[in-house]
Image (cartoon, rainbow, N blue to C red):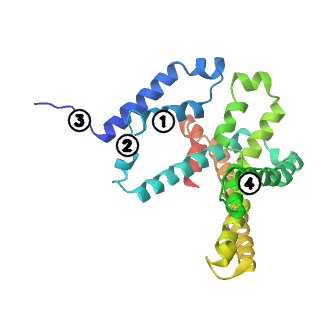
Amino acid sequence: MPTLAVTNFNIVCATLGGFITLFGLVSYLLKERFYLSEALISLIAGVVFSPHATNFVKPLNYANGSEEDLASITLYFSRLVLGVQLVLAGVQLPSKYLQKEWKSLSLLLGPGMTAMWITSSLLVWAMVPDLSFLHSLAVGACVTPTDPVLSNSIVKGKFADKNIPKDLQKIIIAESGANDGLGYPFLFIALYLIKYIGDGGAGQSGGAGLAIGYWFGETWGYTIILGVIYGAVVGWTAKELLHWAHEKKYVDRESFLVFAIALAASL
């Protein structure tokens, strides 16, 4: 006799598909009339569907009950979403925008981010009892960068077009895309100091000198500078190949539209 297959996969597909369908029916109302962002609505839906509420979505079951595997899956999905959004942020900007607005971006990403980092760290240090200042610096570094996903709520849609100047929208997009990578120095200087001089150096031997050396070599040299070079080379090459294929009429409309998302996933 036929039975209904109530598996985790089917429940997730039904839950997510139903939510996206229902949200699509009232998306204009929620975003343009009530000014609610997709990120906030998705967060609320995630809480409702989570094991703490309706228990429709059971992440721990998908990771075979392993907290470590679940953390890894969450990390990889977060990286994928953030990577796609960063590429899309770059695509939204006009040609040679970074060259034209490098002074404004330098001010925001240099003194601006440093001030946000110090302010956030001091607030965390003051509000969380028994937390060392080095750990506060690490927490402050995590909340300093502007999230490109959340910033979409103020640079897109009817509210943004009506209330936010175009130049301000562009600088927010550029700053939110660039500061995720430039948040690494603030985070890793705190982590290296915690590792090598935290608790009186009880963690690892080497002291502040070794911590600063790793910070310059691994964080700035390998992670940031090499990452910028890699992104610039791959991005420029992809742009030239796409222009060549478009001029030769080798690429169809569907592939042209998803090219940026596919490129983000490959990076």
Residue ID for mark 3? 5
Res. 118 in view: yes
Residue 104 higher or lower than 32, as above or below: below
Secondary structure under tag 2 reads loop
Question: Which label was assigned to residue 121?
Answer: 4
Question: Which label was assigned to residue 58?
Answer: 2
Label 4 vs label 2, nearer the camera? 4
Q: Of the residues under marks 4 and 2, which one precedes in the sequence?
A: 2
Where residue 200 appears, x then y in whole percent? 68, 76
- Residue 30 horizontal side relative to residue 58, left or right: right
Q: Is the Cβ of the residue at disc 4 closer than 8 Å to that at disc 3?
A: no
Q: Is the Cβ of the residue at disc 2 closer than 8 Å to that at disc 1?
A: no
- Residue 116 horizontal side relative to residue 139, left or right: right
Residue drawn at point x = 68 percent, y = 25 percent: 157
Label 4 vs label 3, nearer the camera? 4
Inter-mark Cα distance, 2 to 3: 17 Å
Kind of residue sitting beneath label 4 = Ser
Question: Which label was assigned to residue 47?
Answer: 1
Secondary structure under tag 3 reads loop
Secondary structure under tag 1 reads helix
Where residue 134 appears, x then y in whole percent? 70, 64
Inter-mark Cα distance, 4 to 2: 34 Å
The quadrant in which the N terminus is found is top left
Kind of residue sitting beneath label 1 = Val
